[in-house]
Image (cartoon, rainbow, N blue to C red):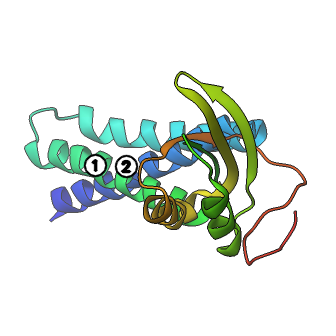
Amino acid sequence: MEGLLLAGAIFVLRVLNYAIGTLRLVAISRGLRTMAAVLAAIEALIFAVVIAGVVQDLENIVNLTAYCLGASGGSWLGMELEARLVKSYVIANVFVAHDATTLTEKLREAGFGVTATIGEGRDGIVMTLRSVINKREMTTFNGIVNKVTPDAFVAVEEARGIRQGWFGTGKGRTL
């Protein structure tokens, strides 16, 4: 029974270790140094405790399995936490080889802020639409683009931070 409790503890701590590691990476990418440092210290402590429980008997398959499954579960949990707790933004760039007025109107009607620019591509005039959106709204955004302009080229990039401007969450809300 004691062996199963140790394996269970290894599993739970490893899940926490990986989940904290994922959040630490988000903090690093956002430039949140203090938060990243605190999470790194917690992550290191948990790792030290867990690895001590595993290396004392490397032939213990149950502990090794708990360690590996904990890493897997922690990765999954970390991604879930990031998706639910961390508000992240993307910059969607939509390139259209023809007039994109209808697409611009539909995106704005759906509550997305859109900046339209006329440019020149390889084959002539193109319209570029740029929109900073909550990452969770990307599926809705893509659905509108695909419905209105299925031949559009869409490139998405992470936005490290945003400040001021018009942000369409809840239609017409500003930062």
Q: Residue furthest bottom?
A: 170
The residue wearing badge 2 is 75
In the image, is residue 175 above or below residue 11?
A: below
- Identified by mark 1, the residue type is Ser
Inter-mark Cα distance, 1 to 2: 5 Å
Instruction: Say whether residue 46 is left or right of residue 57.
Output: right
Q: Given contact means CB atoms under 8 Å apart, are the residues at marks 1 and 2 in contact? A: yes
Q: Is residue 67 left or right of residue 107?
A: left
Please state, as top left, top right, bottom left or bottom right, where the N terminus lies in the image.
bottom left
Residue extending furthest toward the right = 164
Circle 1 crowding by C-alpha within 10 Å: few under 14, some 14–19, many from 20 = some
| Residue at figure coordinates x 87%, y 67% from the top left | 174
Instruction: Work out whether residue 160 or residue 51 is closer to the camera in this orientation and state it.
Output: 160
Say left or right for 34 vs 133.
Answer: right
Image point (73%, 38%), residue name: 118
Which corner quadrant holds the C terminus? bottom right
Q: Dot 2 surroundings within 10 Å: few (below 14), some, or many (20 or more)? A: many
Residue 2 in the image, given as x and y percentages of width and height: 19, 61
Amino acid type at circle 2 is Ser
Quarter where residue 91 is shown: top right
Say which residue appears at 64% left-offset and 65% top-offset. 107
